[in-house]
Amino acid sequence: MTSAQERKIKQTGCDARFDNLTRQLYATDASIYQIEPIGVAFPKSAQQASLVIRAAADAGLSVTPRGAGTSLVGNAIGEGLIIECSRYNRQITELDLEKRSVRVGAGVVLDQLNDFLKPRGFCFGPDVATSSRATLGGMIANNSSGARCPIYGTTADHVISLEIVMADDRIEKIGPTHDSLHAERTRIGNLIRAASGEMTECWPPGLIKRWPGYGIERFLRAPNDLTNILAGSEGTLAAIFSAELKISPLPREKALGLIFFASVGEAMQATVELLDLKPAAIEHIDRPLLDQTKGQLHFQAARDLLELDTKPCAAILIVEFYDDVAERLSILESRKIGLRTKILTDAAQ
């Protein structure tokens, strides 16, 4: 990087670092890849992000928006300037319980949002495994979901509107109630309309989770809402700075159905057969993992509860239900799936 390029970035007033330590820290994410960036910028506002992105373009530098870097596929690293959105942009505002919505900065961590919402009886539905670190901006860019996507869907399903900074430094708000970027919406529509039949065939409406490419099938269903394209675009179309999101009521009751199987194949087939019961989540545990708990004192209570030492199995499905659970648990037991079924309704278990 030349001194002139560094000077252009610093002239924006943005907190920007070009030292070797910072560049090394941001050369990696949770993936196996490593690409050392030229520098890292930490904008405090959308306006500052706009200035930095314009300065980077003028300096001939690419930009890569970054949240917490928890993705496993290397989409938070790049050789240009990293736009780090999580350091300062952590505000939670505009909570509307009647509308069931909240506005968050792109750097708000999922656990931070849920800790804020829980005393009010709400949560943000998609529950990624990295919830203690994953930022909402990154979750939107990645269209993250989590184990409970059967009832909550993906992050894209919970986006109402977005504040974005585009590559040409424009700050825009997009969503079904915002009439911005009309020309862009028209061009996108013209580009993809010819492929609408192929999109419908590849990604039918009932398909909850899918990642390859942009959310074209979502855009075709709601062409006035550009958030359908931005969600899952991994920072390639714009940098997300804040978002208005839908929130969901906390479940009134929960229960688990544990189903034990003689083979993994039987467990996988049963997963399909269980979807009509509308489970919140279905988790699979196989014998190699179960065997790791043998002889370990802190796992013995769980092994006793599941009777693993007296009634061994090759696989377990943990089926979670939210609200109105009694009828579905009764149906689950009546189906006589697998070797045996165990019902847990006590949260202490």
Image (cartoon, helix red, strand yellow):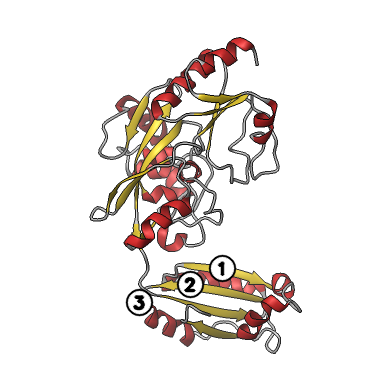
Residue visible at 30% across and 27% down in the picture:
182
Q: Secondary structure at mark 3?
A: loop
First in sequence: mark 1 or mark 3? Answer: 1
- Of 218 and 132, nearer the camera is 132
Q: Label 1, label 3: how many angstroms apart (C-alpha)?
A: 20 Å
- Of 251 and 104, nearer the camera is 104
Identify residue type, mark 1. Glu
Tell me if mark 1 has few (under 14), some (14-19) or many (20+) residues whose alpha carbon lies within 10 angstroms of its own: few
Horizontal side of 169 relative to 264 (left or right) equals left
Residue visible at 25% across and 38% down in the picture:
177
Instruction: Kindly identify which residue carries mark 1.
Output: 283
Q: Position of residue 80 (x, y in %)?
A: 60, 24
Evaluate if marks 2 and 1 touch, with contact meaning CB atoms under 8 Å apart. Answer: yes
Q: Secondary structure at mark 2?
A: strand
Residue visible at 32% across and 43% down in the picture:
222
Evaluate if marks 2 and 3 touch, with contact meaning CB atoms under 8 Å apart. Answer: no
Instruction: Kindly identify which residue carries mark 2.
Output: 320
Q: Position of residue 341 (x, y in %)?
A: 55, 84
Residue 324's tag is: 3
Tell me if mark 2 has few (under 14), some (14-19) or many (20+) residues whose alpha carbon lies within 10 angstroms of its own: many
Identify residue type, mark 3. Asp
Evaluate if marks 1 and 3 touch, with contact meaning CB atoms under 8 Å apart. Answer: no
Q: Secondary structure at mark 1?
A: strand
Q: Label 2, label 3: how many angstroms apart (C-alpha)?
A: 12 Å
Residue visible at 43% across and 24% down in the picture:
48
